[in-house]
Image (cartoon, grey):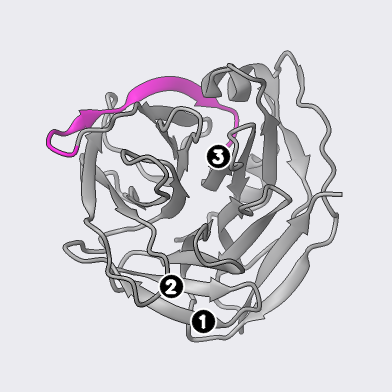
Amino acid sequence: MHIPSFVACSMLLIAACDSPTPTVQFSTEPTMTKVDPGQIDEASGIADSRTMVGALWVEQDGGNPAELALLGYDGKLRGKLAIPNTTNRDWEDLTSGPGPQANVNYLYIAEIGDNNAQYGQYAVYRLPEPKNMTDATGPVERIQYKYPDGARDAETLMLDPQTKDLYVVSKREAKVHLYRLPYPQSTTEVMTAEALGELPYTYVTGGGFSSDGSEILLRTYAGVYYWSRTKGQSVADAMQRTAARDLPYRIEPQGEAICFDRDNKGYFTLSEKASAPNVTLNYYAKR
């Protein structure tokens, strides 16, 4: 993705909200692990594996094969998982969590990129997370949707583990838009996403919930933003009525991917390589 020269300045947009989110401390400098170049150069989404400890699923940008890579915390590639009956038109985010079957963790692949706002319909692919790399890939379901206000580009998909609702955040507006795909999501009809209003950020490239749904992250090319959510509070209320807190972030070549770890003890970021010689898997631990 092309990053406009004004984007760093645009990230200074701040909204007037009720009160800042409660303080949770993270390490100011990440643990940085070099990723072998040539293996994962266009990371657009990551999700910490629930079944294979010490590894993350990584999705690569549009034009790459329709597959997920399994990346160890040590920066080594553990394997790749082909996603059948799909194409990678413009995969832009990846998340995981509960779904239709109890006690099963699902992977959600977001085919939501649309640089030129030309497609009109978008998809989220949902499949059970395999228990190991030799496990057969489970059935892949396709959740199709459109926006109520026309085509747009997005790079952020989040799953609320408390409700199993999916949230999409658009990318390019001066104030991005928040949308919801309520559970149960249809796999037979095109859904119309519910518009929930604006957020005072631009060029949002990723986001995610903690495993219990009590914490929310968004990232841009230039920063990471954090919200705490009280029990029973809606996602829109948490993000729109409470001021986000800036979290530590080391600028990356073209940072798009972010997720909490499976135990909610910190967060990972991963960048596309762009023109850099290599990328690092960065981890910011809670203190």
Whole-percent x and y of residue 285? 78, 55
Say how many tags the image has. Answer: 3
Residue at x-position 45% and y-position 49%: 96
Circle 2: residue type? Ala
Residue at x-position 80% and y-position 27%: 22
Q: Which residues make up the magenta segment?
A: 187-202
Depth order, front residue of 107/34: 107
Whole-percent x and y of residue 71? 53, 74
Q: Circle 3 sits on which residue? A: 202
Q: Is 210 situated above or below 46?
A: above
Q: CA distance from mark 2 to mark 3?
A: 28 Å
- Helix or strand or loop: what does disc 2 sit on? strand
Closer to the observer: label 2 or label 3? 2
- Residues at circles 1 and 2 in contact by the CB criterion of under 8 Å: yes
Q: Circle 1 sits on which residue? A: 77
- Helix or strand or loop: what does disc 3 sit on? loop
Whole-percent x and y of residue 275? 56, 78
Circle 3: residue type? Thr
Q: Residue furthest left?
A: 188
Q: Circle 2 sits on which residue? A: 69
